[in-house]
Image (cartoon, rainbow, N blue to C red):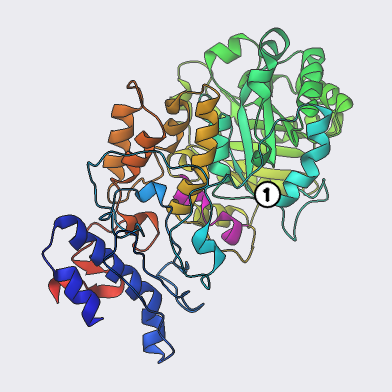
Amino acid sequence: CDTLRSLAMAREGTAKRTALRTLWFCWLQSTLPSVLTASPVPCFTSLSSSPTASFHLNSPPSSARNFRSRPLTMPNARLLRGALPSKMSVLLSQTRKTAPRSIAPRSTYMSLQDSGADSAWRRPLSSPFPRNDLVGADRAASRSVSCSATGGDASAEANGGLPARRLCVAPMMDWTDRFDRYFLRLFSKNTWLYTEMITTGALIHGDSHRHLQYHDAEHPIAVQLGGSEPADLAKCAKMCEEYGYDEINLNVGCPSERVSSGSFGACLMAEPDLVAECLAAMAAEVSVPVTIKHRIGIDDQDSYEHLCKFVDTVQSKSPTRTFIVHARTAILKGLSPKQNREIPPLKYHFVHQLKQDFPHLEILINGGINDLPHASTHLQHVDGVMIGRAAYNTPFQVLAEADRDIYGEDVTPKTRQEVLEQMLPFIEEQLAEGVSLNSITRHMLGLFHGCKGGKAFRRHLSDNVHKDGSGIHTLMEAVERVPLAVRMGLVPDNFKEPLDVLLPDGIPSPATQ
C-alpha cells in the first residue's frame, strides 16, 4: 500500500501519475475484501524499468467484488492503447495521449505474463459469436445450435429450446436494424429482438436479402411484417422462415398516416376478421409461431369491450396465441407517431385484465416501460414485457442485468468494457465489407448515457465518424473520453466526482491522504 501510494503521488508527469492512481484504485478493489478478512492478499510482484517490463497480478479471490457484485476484469488492450508510458505494458488508465496510434492485429493479447492467472485475463480479441454466412434451409437447420449457445434457460418454452418471451426489445423503424440488434444481443442472451417493420412490398419487389439478413448471434429473433393482403403476407412469411427467424409478427399497431394509407398498421384494428385471415394465411405457410402486435384501440373504438372483441375474433379464427399489446389507443387522425407514443394515456389495467379474461393466450405488454424494476411489476400480471426506446437509448441500464433479474440465471452482468471488447471484431468485419462506421456506432451512442464522460464519448463519435479516414480508431478515441472506472463498472453510473478524489465506498484516494 505504501509503495503504491508513494508512486501515485510522485510528480513525474500527468500520464504516469494518473496511471498509477488507477493501479492503486484497481488494487484496492481486488484486495480490500481479503484485507478485511485477514486472508492472503494478492499483490503486484514485479515492476522493472526495462522497456519490455510488465507486472504480474495474482488472480483476485472469488470474494473480491465491487459495489455492483461484479468481479474485476482486465480491460481490452486496444481500447486503452496509449494510456500508459511505453515501459508499462499493462494498459490500465483512461489518460488521453496524442501519440500516433496503430491498429493492433486481431490476435492481440493482454500482456499479462503470469501463467497462473485466470485465462479470462488474457482473452484474445475475437468475436464471441460465429459469423453468419448461412441462408435459407442451412441457416434454419443451424438455428437450434446457435440458440443453445446464445440463449435459453430452465424455463424456456417448448418451441425449439428458445427462452420465454419474458422480455423483448420492440421493433423500431430506423433503429432496430441488424447492427443495433447485434449490439443489444451482447448485453442479454435471452431477450427477444425484433426487426424493424418490413412491408410485404419491400420483400416481394425489393432487395429481400438486404431486409432479412442478420447474424446468427441475434437469436432469439423475430421479424415484423407490415401488410394487409393475406396472400402477400403468406409469401413473405415463408421467405422469413427460410431465413431462419424464430417468430413472425404482424404489425397492427403503427399509427403512421403513411402506413394507414397502405391499409395496414393500427387501422387494421377496425377489421378483426381481415387480421385473422392474414394471420391464418401466414401460419399455414410456416412452422414457427405467428404473433400479432397491436394497440388497445383506435380513435373512438377505445373501450375494453372493443379490445376484447378484437382479441376474441383473432384468436378464434386464427392459430395465433401470442398478443403483444401496446397499452395506448392509436389516434389515426391529428397525431403524429411521436405524439401517439406520448399523448394517449397508458391503460395498463386493460392489458392486465386481458390476461385474466384470456388466460390461455400469451399476453405481452408494451408502452412506457423504461427499466427492469418496472418490467418486473408487470410480469406479475402478464406473460412478458416489451421495451422500446428505453432499451435503445440506455441499453446498459435496461438489458445488462436482464438475464439475471428477468430470467433468473445465475450470471454476472457484463460491464460496458466487456461489451466494447466483444463489439470490436464485429465492427472490423463490417468495415471490411464496406459498411460505414456510422451505420454501426450510431446505435452505440447511448452506451454511456448518464455516466461521467458520456457526453464527450457521444460528441467525439458524432463529430468524427463522417470524416475521411474514420475507422475503428475513431471509436477507440471516443472510448478514451470515458474513465476506465466507469467502463469497468467500478463506480455508479451517476458518479460525478473526480475519480482521483474519491474511490468507491468512501475510500480517499492517494492524492487526498
| Quarter of the figure with the N terminus | bottom left
Q: Which of 462 and 401 is in front in this view?
A: 462
At 57% across and 36% down in the image, what residue appears? 181
Q: Nearer the viewer, residue 258 or 130?
A: 130
Q: Which residue lies furthest to the left in this view?
A: 11
Q: Give the range drawn in magenta.
A: 395-406
Q: For this view, does 411 lie left or right of residue 46? A: right
At 82% across and 46% down in the image, what residue appears? 160
Image location of residue 242, percent across then percent down: 80, 26
The residue carrying mark 1 is: 150
Q: Residue furthest right?
A: 284
Image location of residue 277, percent across then percent down: 82, 21
Q: For this view, does 457 lie left or right of residue 72? A: left
Q: Which of 325 and 164 is in front in this view?
A: 164
Image location of residue 295, percent across then percent down: 61, 31
Q: How many labels does the image show?
A: 1
Amino acid type, callout 1: Thr
The correct choice, above or below, for 276 with respect to 445 in the image is above
Q: Residue furthest front?
A: 50
Asked which quadrant contains residue 20, the reply is bottom left
Q: Which residue lies furthest to the bottom in this view?
A: 38
Image location of residue 479, percent across then percent down: 34, 44
Q: For this view, does 227 lie left or right of residue 52? A: right
